[in-house]
Structures are given as structure tokens and as C-alpha cells.
Image: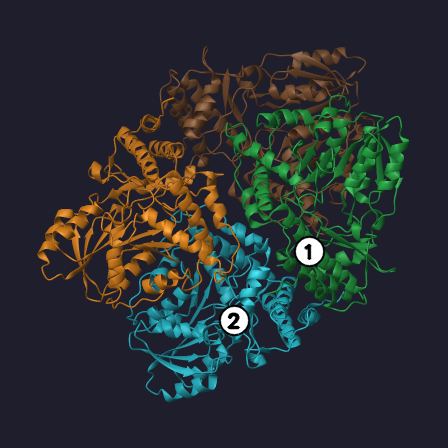
Chain colours: A cyan, B green, C brown, D orange
Amino acid sequence: MQHQNPIFIPGPTNTPDVIKAAMNVSNFDHRAPDFADDYIPLLNDLKKVFKTETGQVLLFSATGTGGWEGAISNTLCAGDKVLIARYGMFIQRSIYLSQPFGLDVEVVECEWGTGAPVEEFAHRLRADKKGHIKAVLVTHNETATAVKSDVHGVRKAIDNASHSALLMVDAVSSLASMDFQMDAWGVDIAITGAQKGFMLNTGLAIVGVSPKAMAGTATATLPRCFFDFNDMANANKIGSYPYTPPVQLFNGLRASVSLLLNEGMSNVYARHHRIAEGVRAAVKAWGLELCAHSPELYSDTVTAIMVPEGKDANLITQHAYKAYGVSFGGGLGEMAGKLFRIGHLGAMTDVMVLSGIATAEMVMVDLGYNINLGSGVAAAQSVYRRGV
Amino acid sequence: MQHQNPIFIPGPTNTPDVIKAAMNVSNFDHRAPDFADDYIPLLNDLKKVFKTETGQVLLFSATGTGGWEGAISNTLCAGDKVLIARYGMFIQRSIYLSQPFGLDVEVVECEWGTGAPVEEFAHRLRADKKGHIKAVLVTHNETATAVKSDVHGVRKAIDNASHSALLMVDAVSSLASMDFQMDAWGVDIAITGAQKGFMLNTGLAIVGVSPKAMAGTATATLPRCFFDFNDMANANKIGSYPYTPPVQLFNGLRASVSLLLNEGMSNVYARHHRIAEGVRAAVKAWGLELCAHSPELYSDTVTAIMVPEGKDANLITQHAYKAYGVSFGGGLGEMAGKLFRIGHLGAMTDVMVLSGIATAEMVMVDLGYNINLGSGVAAAQSVYRRGV
Amino acid sequence: MQHQNPIFIPGPTNTPDVIKAAMNVSNFDHRAPDFADDYIPLLNDLKKVFKTETGQVLLFSATGTGGWEGAISNTLCAGDKVLIARYGMFIQRSIYLSQPFGLDVEVVECEWGTGAPVEEFAHRLRADKKGHIKAVLVTHNETATAVKSDVHGVRKAIDNASHSALLMVDAVSSLASMDFQMDAWGVDIAITGAQKGFMLNTGLAIVGVSPKAMAGTATATLPRCFFDFNDMANANKIGSYPYTPPVQLFNGLRASVSLLLNEGMSNVYARHHRIAEGVRAAVKAWGLELCAHSPELYSDTVTAIMVPEGKDANLITQHAYKAYGVSFGGGLGEMAGKLFRIGHLGAMTDVMVLSGIATAEMVMVDLGYNINLGSGVAAAQSVYRRGV
Amino acid sequence: MQHQNPIFIPGPTNTPDVIKAAMNVSNFDHRAPDFADDYIPLLNDLKKVFKTETGQVLLFSATGTGGWEGAISNTLCAGDKVLIARYGMFIQRSIYLSQPFGLDVEVVECEWGTGAPVEEFAHRLRADKKGHIKAVLVTHNETATAVKSDVHGVRKAIDNASHSALLMVDAVSSLASMDFQMDAWGVDIAITGAQKGFMLNTGLAIVGVSPKAMAGTATATLPRCFFDFNDMANANKIGSYPYTPPVQLFNGLRASVSLLLNEGMSNVYARHHRIAEGVRAAVKAWGLELCAHSPELYSDTVTAIMVPEGKDANLITQHAYKAYGVSFGGGLGEMAGKLFRIGHLGAMTDVMVLSGIATAEMVMVDLGYNINLGSGVAAAQSVYRRGV
């Protein structure tokens, strides 16, 4: 029966019935003349979720990681310098991704638990008089540490330095759950996957591309084919797709975008924020610390909770799964064993997350933590209570 | 997103994915020669869930109410006397069902919150020297008050009076969730529906019939056709069905029986008991009373919680649904407004029910109850905690 | 792979993906305040399919057979006379159904392959000066012989005799596929099931009831409970249901009604007619005879094909299933072995039925019939061809 | 209703219910300790379908095109020479794919309708004394022309020339439908997608890699990240996955592999061959020509049919879709307008394909082709008939 429990990982998420139904259609002919009738409006509606009017959204049959690879290979050349701050596992993956492509990665080392170092970026960009830095890569919501970065701030740093670098953003665990404004924030490439805020099965890299980034493909010499932005954009223009499209995910995505736009993006953000506030209240009630260093960094889609010195956080995820059938996120990279994570994005409600908080309490008490049963739940309930 | 919440009504239940998948098959030909290859083993396996070797299980395309009608119309004659104690809404329904058939219902009035009055039954059966009472009708688990009756005790009362009355049991909200032993307890007809312990969609009356009850159809003169036991039993003998069968539900039922038998019936009972114990601990922590008068009456599939004098329990279910998207059961019949119910049967886990308990707390606090947030959750967690 | 083949039985039908998805929802709370928001409009839309404005449509968790039982038990008394013509297996079932209820069935024996004997009915109704006949029972589309009866003619016969008998119609295999006009034809009770023209899973008796039939429940003394029309109608008035409703089927029915009304009822009828005309053209090309005696009797949802003297039609259905994985309907009752049936109602297209015709040809040739492969297909193709 | 028709495109295919159900599961935690319990056996069972014992099978969240990119980028260096014969659209795609990676493509121009030119390959390989050719790329089943190539013959040509070139095979539309023997034929990399012989939704590149190909990754300098074979293989060793896996497709793939192995691979091949033979018999009866030049080239998963001089094949696919709701494949590349294709792979039966043949006939007659209705169907029926 434990498969009945919600999952509390920071993606894949729990999926609404209506989206599951939308993905459960038979294969149909993607070369049929009416394929475009659904596909083109879908691409247009996605722009509302990305909050872009000038850019376009591309859908690759892959995961967010594939989207990152496409971002790099479509806009850069071997030897190009990119500026990245290392403050978590997923931004580190973009460093890792950059290496096989022969990029010259300028790494700003940051403490995990902090976000993109806007001031340091500003400094380095100003210093880069010759414009060697071709792109700044930022993870909007660092899933490993539950830290939100100031993407708009990074853009301002670039602009204030009168720098031409592209701003590429991993929005995998923020988009469609937390405020994200592609145009207003000057994002050139924004990447997410199907299985996060869109609440679908895994299998889509969903990539927002600005006109500037698209223009940059003309001079970018890195090899690409499957993730070629122009092949995709050109096919999209006529409502077509350069290879066999994952039509079930497209169908699900239409249902997802409808759900999101009907709820209203600001309501979606508010729901995630309220849920997250409750989880953070629970953490405080437990007397534990967040990995995120300060409130403006707090993520609304995942909460990363430091365990006390001497404790092994891996035991929490293992015991939760084995004893209660509940999946939490573990610590990754340098945070392995030091924190565990409660994911609360996508098809999540106050009611559902309370069972996650309650389970975390039982697990910690089982493991000898000095925690009062019910304490975190009560704190979260105070946040979630409605009036009558 | 609120449709993502589990439901906490005492049926229909939450349904496991694997059962949903089993019900999601296309129509197929129920007259095909291999239809019986699945159907006959299913009927046999159901006997293991009913714990009968001598009886048989019949599947009608209806609900439990239809099963009750069949129990009456197949075994009794107009004017026959039946003995029923009125201690809740669902046993009252069997009184209601008996009336159009012209039965002479001998009603034992009981306080709601108590169960079948074994001693009074014994008294009346002993007094019925001429055997006017043809059947004793009992609800094993009275869903409206969350009270379990001593079915085995009723059988002993019948036998001790050397009486020949049939024992007919509404096991709708107990079977496949709470201990039920058709043969050992001498039950002649046991009735349940698809949407309770079997965790299916609504649409099956699942009826266990003893050889004695089946023999009784020969002299029973009440009209019946759709619910005719002999038509069904005769068709079943050759793996056939007297009209179009609901094959998707049969498919789901096979998946359900597999799940149950794989978990082991005693483990299924233990899981429901543990979950119920946690809910009762929560009620105690809240300082509220159960409707059930004493521990041996406690149901393991539903908990009925009295609200304090002056409170309207209907506000709880209304507010829970409207503000939190959570469905609890309300008070029925003479308990309307006096109690609310948390259903916890079927595809339910400790983790899931904690969110129901937490929601009930928020709702009651919202409504001005003198309850501490987290208090009931903490009490339940103490029950649910595993060691490491 | 043979489960991939369409089924060619006269119900259950093939089900559209969108309806399967609509039935594949989790259980939800039927006592929730918004249950009525979907249920009441559904009941209203169903009236458009039944073509009634004055009547109402009731949904029982059962099959069409249960609907028949309800029609009888809600409107008649033991000893009442009903007029029925025996011209097929399913109208015979209504005779069978009438017996346990102690009705006095006046049977008009007719040759199978003919329909309701309007003239003979007229004669008997005129002769029944004292109004002993309380109801005339007709099967609109006799599934066993693929014969359509003139329901409107029967009503005229009743009216012309100034008779007050109720007109009860088994519209199981016609409604939502063939023209049916409850009000215009003066039908008092019309019955169908979910798994025919509505293309759902089995499990609903869908019953149209005229005001006159409803009024008749006041004096009808036959026992009924599960199928009580007043219990259901009263509950429906407030958007409620007297017992646990099969909500997944309701959801599916909403999708079905949308599909039907969007296609347009007259287009639905025209599609079924065209498909049936093609099948009949195939039969003619094979040199075989229909069971139906004359064109005005031809059914548009199923075709019953006589096999030549000396052939056993059961071998056709058996061989089709075993060798090709295709289900046809067999001969029933006195037509057993004499005919086989191709069902073509519900989610059926010209393209799909061609594979059924082609399979029938292969089967017959395998069995030594003097049939040319492709001959029936060609005849049907001539009917199905579109211009360019 | 036209969405009810089977699809007759050469992939994506029709999907069995049981596979659809397997893909319709909720997201679960891919980092849970029991993830590997299903994943590792799946990878092992896939080897039976690829018929490899020494190789391994990798599953990328992408399509077959992504698999091709991975084959190239993991084993080759910029400037490497690859030998490719251009005899169809999909092998041409591998030429296209090779270009951005800076490969030196030695193209052997062939007539479309022929297959891999074994003799010419043999000649060129023998002439390549210095071993500049690093890989020979072959499409086993050229979907655009319905031509099967002699993959084993190409391997023999390589070996006979004592050449060390890798043999990379696009088996997208053959694997799991037509005989394919990775080890026995000496294939180094074999690529397919989920939506063909495996009958799944689109979204997996399924890649068989020989030990030699794997060893070649050590010296291959082309950039790769998402499709990195070593990252994947290393993760697989511990039952893990380098990024978020498409778990629903994995679940479906398990169901698919079970279906295939239960049917038996040789029975799967025989079924496809029989179906294809029927389609080819129909083409002959129509008096039309196949694109494939000779019988040993005939594909068993798709049939490409040349239209007579002066006809536009595109009108066939357009009219079939618009008038009958049936999807055929059109002509691609230099075959555009010259041929149309009937796909018959995956979840296909004799019965289903007959409706495709019948539809093609109607379409062609509608368009003025000199074809007798029923003629192709009759020819196919002769192939499909079983004895009794």
C-alpha cells in the first residue's frame, strides 16, 4: 500500500489525475495535417508560463540535462569562457556539462547554501573588458540546497557592466512553481523538465530561448544535432517536429498548461510559497537549520534541512523509505549525509505535505533526534490554517 | 490541486494504481470461450477472502444495497419475520429494505453507538418457539457509528436457541479490511460492495452465500430476477454470467484479490487496526469522545467522533471540504450534526491518515474547538512509529 | 496481439480513448457539495439523447436487465396483464422477467426475424375493452435477430384503441445509435445500458421515464427497493443519489454524451446506418440471407446473418475467435446455430468494420462456405467510398 | 470516432492495452533503494531481444535520432572517416547527423529501393589499407523505402577485408519485429526507439553497444554529455541512472519485453512476416510495384508502394486521413509524391491490417486508380487464412 503515499522528492512530482489521463492516449500520427492544430497553440501558451513574449519555447524529447547540453552547444564555441558559481550540485552539473565541450569555465567558488554571487559576478564582468565571458550560467533554484538565486540581479550585473554575455538559467525546479520572468529578467535561455512544475512524466527538456540566444546559434560552432535549436525552431514554425515527437507528453503538457493558467500563475506561486512556509515553520519548531543561509534565498519548491553534527542524514531517507514508504530527497555532493530534503512542488497541497512533515518527525524520533512528535506539524498547521 | 488529496470517507476508498490499471481495460467479449478461464478462479479466490469453503461468492452488477435486496428476496417470503436491531443508519437501511417486501420486521431498538444486542437476540430467539423468525440481519461494521458487532456471538445465540434462522450480515465496510470468517461464524449471507475493502470503483454487490441460504431459495417466494441467486449460481457453474458482466470490475477484482492475498489477510487486518488505533489516539488527545461506547465495539475501518454539545458536526465536513479539499464522513440519521467520521479503509497507510488527522485538527481549530494543533497527530504518530 | 482487434459483438462496444480516460478517475466523495454540479447537468443532457423534454432519465448501478426489472416493479401489480410479442431472445427475456413478478403475460407468438406486430397489437388492444392490459413491452432493436420494431407504430396502435396501457421499450441496443424519440413516439419507459450506444464499461441501467409512468408508481404494488424510481427521482432532484453511485461511469457518461451531442444525434444515426448498409451489402454479395425479413426491419447496430441449411453457425464464432482473435455474436435461443451476428454499434467506423467483414469472409471460406474472398469487402467498400 | 482506427504508419505503432497500463503509473522515486530491482533485470532481458550476450543495452531519454548522435559522439573523433551508402531517407539522416560532428563521410550513392551495397562496401574496405574508415553506418530497415539490408553481409565484408571499422546499425524499424542478431552479425552499435517494435510511447533511444564499441569510447574525442555511454553504463552497473529516468517508459518496456519474450522472438518475426506477405500480395493484386527492388530486400514492418507515373502519392495519404481517418506513411525525400507506405509493425494483427488494405483500396479508387475494390484484400486474405 505504500505506493499510495505521495512522494516528497523535489521532482518528479505527484501528478494530477487529469494530467495522467491526458498522457494516457494512444499513439497517433504526428505527420497528420491536424498535428499542428494542437502543437502551435501549446508552444504559444508555454510562453505565458515562461513569461516571454519575444522568446520561444522548444520541446526536446530528453530531460533538463539534455536541455542544458543544447543551451551550450547551440550558442557557444570550444574555448569560450563561461562564468559559473559553484554553490550546489545542479549548478555543478552545468560545470560538468561544459567540460566535454571544451569551454573555459571560470568558476566562482561559493559556500553551499548561498546563491548566485551577484556582486562577484558584477565585479568579474566589469573586469572582463574584452568580453571573453560569453555566458553566465545560473541555477535559479538550486535543488540540492534549496536555495533560490537572484536571476534578475545577475542580469542587472551583466547590463551594468555593459557586457554582452548570455544569461543561461537552469529553472528546472522553479519554473511553473516559483516566480520566473524570462523577458523581464533578461534571461536568454531558461531550461526545465517535464517532471517538475509541469507535473508530467519525465521526458521533456523544455527550453525558453531569447531572440539574442537564437541569433547566437549562427556563430556557435560546437557540434549539435539532436538538440539543434534551429532545426527545432524551423520545424515548429510550420507546426512540425524534426523527429518523432513524444505526443503523449505533449498532450499532458497541454493539460498541465491549462491547469496552471486556470489556477493563475500568481496563485500557483502563492500556493507553493504557503506550502514552503509551513515546512520551514516545521523545521524551526524542530530546532533544525535550513541549508539556505538567509530568507531571501529560501526555495518554495524544496526545503533542505541540515541534520545536527554527528548525525547521518542518509539514515533519514533510508528509514523513511523502508519503514514508512516515503521518499524524501537526500543530500547530494558535498551535502551528502549532512542534510535531507522535503520536496513540495507540483501537484502538492497543504494537506499532502502535512503527511510528509509528520513522517519526517517519526523518522527523526525513531533515529534518536531530540524532536517532539507533532511539533513541526503544529507549526505548519498554523501556517496552513484558513479562517472560516 | 485539491483532488490530489486522499479521501477520508468510509468508502469509496482510495484506489491503488495497479487496481486502477486493471480496471482500465477495453471491453472484451464475455461470451468468448476463455472468459471462464479468469472468472472461475476469481470466484474461488474470493472464497479465501470471505473465509468460506462451503459457501460460494456471487458478483452482481450493482452496489451493496442491491446485494441486500437479493439476500432478502432470494431466501424469504412475504410475511416472514426477521429480527433486526436498530443501532445505526446502515442496519436501518436493511429495515427499510425489508418493508417493500412485506416482511414482518421485529425491531430491537438500541442506542446508536452500541452493536448487535447478542443477549437480547438470544432471548428473543429462545422465545420464538415456533420459529417465526426466519432471519437475523446484522451489520457487522455499522459505518454510521463506527461500531463493530459480534457476528459470531449472534450465531452462537441462534445456535444456543436451537433456532433455524438464517444469519445475514452486512459486511460492506468490514470485509477485506477487518477480520471476517464466514464459515467459522456461521454466516449465511455476507454482503459487501466493490468500493470498500476491495478498493475498486463502485458497481459490484459481492455476496457470500452459504449452502443453507442457497437451499432456502427453493421455498422463498419473493419475486426476484436481476438478483436471482440461482440464475447467477447456475451460470457461474459453467463460468458464465446471466447478463452482461462488468468485466472491468472483474479485472480489477482479480488485481484486488491478488493484492490482498499477497499482503495476507491477517496483515491486512493488522494494518487497518494499527491505522485505526492511531486515529483513536488522536481523538483521545483532542479530548473528544467516540460514538462507539466501548473498546470491543471499535471499528477498524472508520472512526466516528462526537462533537461537544452545542457544536454542529456538519460544519466540520463542510469546512474541511471547502477550505482544505478534504472529504470526511458526516453524521447520518439520528447522528446528523452530532459526529463526523474519518474513513480509513482500503488503500490507506499510516502516512496518508496523518494528513487526515492533521486536517481535522485545523478544521476544528478554525471552528473554535479547544484543540491544540498537532496534538492528535502526535498521539497517532506514537502509534505509528516504527523502531529502527 | 489479438486483444488489439476491435470487437464485433452487439455490445459491449469498442470504447473511445477519451471515454476510457474519463472513466479512469480516482474515487471521489459523492456526498461532497459539488457532486450535484456535474450530476444534474448530466441528467439534463441525457434527455437530449433520449429526446424527451417531459420525462426524466434515471441511472441505476446495474445493467439493462436491472432496468427492465425496475420498469416492471415500479409500474405494475401482481396479476397485471402485459402484452408482449415473442420475436427474439431479448424480448423473450422481458417475458422471463415478468414471470417472477406474477404478471399475466399475454404472448403474441411471432416468427423470429419479424418485429413487433403492430396490427395484432392494435387488434388485441381494441379488444381489451376493460383495460386489463396494463403495459405493452417492446424491444426496439431485437439484438438476437437484428430486427428493428416500429415503436411509434405501437404507440399509435395503443392510442387508436384509446387504450391506457403503458409503452415500455427495451432500447438497449438502439438508443444513442439509431433514431429514438421518446416523447414523439409516446414511450413511457425506455431502457438502455452503458455498454452499448454510450460506449462505456458495463454497469449502468439508463432508464427514461415519462410523467405517466412516474405517476403510475403511486399505485404499483410490486415490491422494489434498489430499483425504486421514486427514491432515485427524489434524490436526483437535489443532485443526490440514494446509495453509492458509480462515479467513474457517470464521468464516462458525461464524456460520452459530449461526444454524441458534438457529433450530432442525426450524424450518429447516419454513421450507424452507413456502416450497417455496408455490412448488408457484404451479406448480399456473399449470397447469404439476413434474419430480418424485410428492409424496414433492418437494424443499424447489428446484422444477423443466416447460414445455409446444413451449416452450424456456432463454428463461425468459434473459429473466428480461435483462429483470428475476433469476436462475433452467435445465434441465441431458437436461432442458435442458425445465424451469426456482426455487431457494429458504438465507437465503430467504416474502416474498422471492414476488418470484421474481411474476417468473416476468411472464416467462412475456412469452413467450406462457397464465398469469394474479398467479395463482401468490395460490396461494403462501395457503400463506404467517399468522393474526393 | 476516427481516432478509433488503427494507425498504419511505420511507427509509432498501435500499443497494447497492457503496455498502456504499464506506462500509466504515477511518478516514483528513482533514487529509492529498490529502483535497481526492476531496472537491472530489464536491462538484462533487453539483451535477449537484441540477441547479445557480450554487449549491453543503454536506455536514453530521447528518440532513436538521439541514439544515433550518441553512437557517433561516443566512438569517433572529428575528421574520422565513416562509410555510408545513401539509399533512403533514414540512412541519409545518419549522413546529416555526421556532418555537425566534422566526420569525413564517404558516401556511396545507391538507388533508392536498394539496400546496403555489400559488394561495394567490401571493395572500399579492402581498398582502405590504412584504416581511415572508422565506422560503417547501415540502416537495417530503411523505413522510407521499406528495404531491408543485409547487415550480416556488411559485417562479413568488413571482416573479409580484415578491417577494424565499427559496424553501426540503425535498427529503429526492425528491432523487435524482424530478425536481428547483434552478436551473430557482429554489430557494434544497434539503435532503436521505444515507439516501434517495442510498441511504447515515444521517448527512449534504446542502444545496444558491443564491448568493442564501448572500448572505443576511450579514444573518441567528440564532445558528449547527455548521451555519454560511459556515464550511462557506469550508472547502470549499480542499477542507477545519470539523470532523471523516464520511469513510466521503463515500466512499459518491462511489459513490452515480457510480451515479446512470451510470444517468442521467432514467433514475433513470423507474425510480422506473414502480415507483410499479405500486404505485398495486395500490392501485386493492385498491379502496383514495390519500391524495394527484389524479394530479399522486402521489409516485414512497412511496405512502400510506388504510384503510377503521373499520380501524386501525397494525395493518397491526405485523402486517407481526411476522408477515412486513416494514417499511412507518405513518401520522404526523393520519394516524396512517388510512393505511399503502409506500416504494419508492433501491435498489429492480420485482422487489423486488412482494414488498412481495404482503406487503401477505397482511397485509390476515389482518386481514379484503376484498381478493383476488394482485390487487394482478397489477395491478403489468401495469405492470412488459417485452416480449421
- Residue A374 quadrant: bottom right
Give coordinates of residue C14: x percent, y percent.
Answer: 51, 35
Q: Is residue D268 left or right of residue C240?
A: left
The residue identified by callout 2 is A180
- Same subunit: marks 1 and 2: no
Residue name at image x 67 percent, y 49 percent: B269
Looking at the image, is D188 positioned above or below residue C311?
Answer: below
Residue type at mark 1: give it. Arg
Q: Tell me which chain the residue with mark 2 is part of.
A: A
Give coordinates of residue C120: x percent, y percent.
Answer: 67, 12
Q: Quadrant of the N terminus of chain B?
A: bottom right
Q: Nearer the viewer, residue C304 or B89?
A: B89
Looking at the image, is B300 positioned above or below residue A139?
Answer: above
The residue identified by callout 1 is B274
Give coordinates of residue A338: x percent, y percent.
Answer: 52, 76
Looking at the image, is B279 positioned above or below residue B10?
Answer: below
Give coordinates of residue D199: x percent, y percent.
Answer: 40, 45
Q: Nearer the viewer, mark 1 or mark 2?
A: 1
**Quick one: which residue is furthest to the right in this view?**
B127
Where disc 1 sits, the SS reads helix
Q: Nearer the viewer, residue D154 or C233?
A: D154
Residue type at mark 2: give it. Phe
